[in-house]
Amino acid sequence: METQTGAKIMNDVSEAGSISTPDIIRIAKKYAGKTKYTGKFAMVLNDVGGFSSPYNILKPCVGSGTMDGVGSKLKIAFETGRHDTIGIDLVAMVANDLLADKLEPAFLHDYIAMGPFTRAHFESVLTGIAKGCNIAGMQILGGESANMRFLYASGEYDLAAHGTGFANVDEYIVNGSGIKPGMSIFGLSSSGIHANGFTKMREVLHLNGGSNGLRKGLLESDWKGVLEGRTLADELLIPTKIYLKEVRRACKKYEITGFAHITGGGLPENIRRILPGGCSAHIQKDSWKWPPIFSLIQREGDIGAEGMLSTFNCGIGFVAISGDDMVSDDWMHIGTVKRGKKKVLFT
């Protein structure tokens, strides 16, 4: 039963323009309906809105799931009032992890917890999630949109998602066990900083000093001479690239023994995760050009190359290991697998 005090608070929030819970549900269903999985592994049985999300497996396959969020990149969206691309980052975090195991991204469950939030802001976030799903070939099966006005400040929210993917049993790469010394390491370009390293970036670029500092650092044109005509906000909010097309093309043409999605920990941590015992990865750190944002962070923070490569993607967002020559418009040769301890070394 709603108390008079509770009713007054609800009215105050409503008068301030915050979206209501019934509108949250209705709008979330609308944007979920804009997504569709058209793959061959499963068929959705229910519309969004049930207590669970049943689907029928259509053929023998391997299925897997992963969960992730966007982290402190959200803070840039809050500070600039630009929410239309952050949902693409959310989808990319889980879709690219599925692709790293050679899984076809299929289904997404999202979680949005928000403070007092306008309908326009909510729809802007969902627009990005739906767009990301359409790029990744994923369908929103359900989720949770929680109106938590006593926990989050006005206009602030948190995002997380769980993704499900499928693969043919005989094609599934589980652990990179087929990687051998002599194989080559190839990389795909990132679209920018993606969604990792924002805490370090904020410290280095002095973005924690209050509203005046933020406006100067993010919205004015101080950085245009370095960032090729973009403001810092423009650069930081470029959405994470979803590598579905590139990975699909590669899988059709080459025998690939391992993929890695380059997120937190950079190249060393994420390549190491797929190396078998007795193999080390030797990366030529001058084999690709770093995008300007990373050169800016390195200069302002006086950070060494290996420190940067251990924190940021530095221009490489996804990696493949193969015995084939994969150099193409998509893939760059960036290193070689050699005998040695299970680690990543830079030359």
Image (cartoon, rainbow, N blue to C red):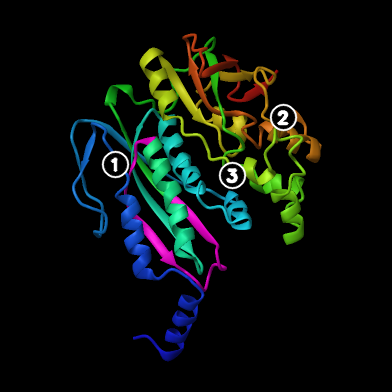
Residue depicted at x 59% and y 20%: 281
Callout in the foreground (2, 1) = 1
| Distance (Cα) linking label 1 and label 3 | 26 Å
Task: Measuring from the top left, give residue 77's x and y in whole percent.
Answer: 58, 53
Q: What element carries label 1?
A: loop
67 relative position to 71: left or right: left
Q: Label 3: which residue?
A: 237
Q: Is mark 2 on a helix, strand or loop?
A: helix
Q: Callout 2, which amino acid?
A: Glu
Q: Label 1: which residue?
A: 36
Tell me the quarter of the picture where residue 119 sits: bottom left
Residue depicted at x 34% and y 26%: 172
Q: Does residue 217 show up magenta in the picture?
A: no
Above/below status of 114 relative to 127: below
Q: Callout 3, which amino acid?
A: Leu
Q: What element carries label 3?
A: loop
Disc assigned to residue 167: none
Task: Measuring from the top left, give residue 210's x and y in whole percent.
Answer: 74, 61
Looking at marks 2 and 3 on the same chain, the residue that comes earlier in the sequence is marked by: 3
Residue depicted at x 59% and y 44%: 237
Q: Callout 1, which amino acid?
A: Lys
Looking at marks 1 and 3 on the same chain, the residue that comes earlier in the sequence is marked by: 1
Task: Measuring from the top left, give residue 322's x and y in whole percent.
Answer: 47, 14
Whether residue 183 is visible to the viewer of this picture, yes or no, is: yes
Residue count near mark 2 (Cα–Cα under 10 Å), binned few <14, some 14–19, many ≥20 = some
Q: Label 2: which residue?
A: 306
Start-end of magenta stretch: 136-160
